[in-house]
Amino acid sequence: MEVSVGLAYQNLDAITRRCMLEEIDLDIQAGTVYISRFLNPEGCARWPIILRQAAETGDDDSLAQAIVSDQCLHDRYEKRKPKGGTTWSDVPYTAPQTMGEGEFNRYYARGLCRRAIDEGVMELEVYRAKSVAQPRFESQGMWVS
């Protein structure tokens, strides 16, 4: 499975990575690392490891690739039906990319906030990190040129 180009991280340097790792380690110690229902048992066990590896030297793309290469995902998952009961669905083919982007970006943002606090920075600038051909109308209104 090929994974597409991920997010552009403007401040992903050694200091930010250290702060990201501190945030990941806090969640690991507290038992609050997000575990997707798409992860199989081996994936659940590997998740903190591959998450840390991506924060140390990779990015959202390398995290998504590790999800695939380490065979971390179920083929199918159980989900609730709108009118009650459950059914089985295929894990979306986009799951590795979605998980990689979402979780790496979560720790990137937390790492930047930790870094800002440590360095006495009072404001951070939010920017669109994903290049999209057709941005949603709602998000276009959030960005000022």
Image: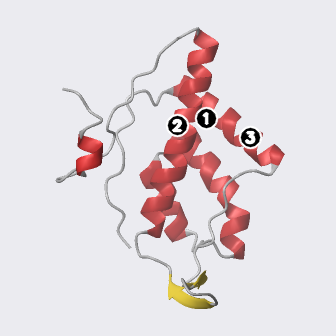
Give the alpha-carbon distance from disc 3 to disc 2, as whole Å: 13 Å
Residue 112: give x, y in percent of width and height: 53, 27
Q: Who is closer to the viewer here, 105 or 58?
A: 105
Residue occupying image coordinates x 23% and y 49%? 137
Which comes before the other along the chain, label 3 or label 2? 3
Residue occupying image coordinates x 56% and y 85%? 81
Which comes before the other along the chain, label 2 or label 1? 1
Give the alpha-carbon distance from disc 1 to disc 3, as whole Å: 9 Å
Residue 20: give x, y in percent of width and height: 61, 35
> Tag 2, which secondary structure?
helix
User: In the image, is residue 95 above or below residue 112?
Assistant: below
The answer to whether the residues at label 2 and label 1 have Cβ atoms under 8 Å apart is: yes
The image quadrant of residue 118 is top right
Furthest-top residue in view? 120
Give the alpha-carbon distance from disc 2 to disc 1, as whole Å: 6 Å
In the rendered image, is residue 131 in sight? no
Provide the residue designation for mark 1: 20
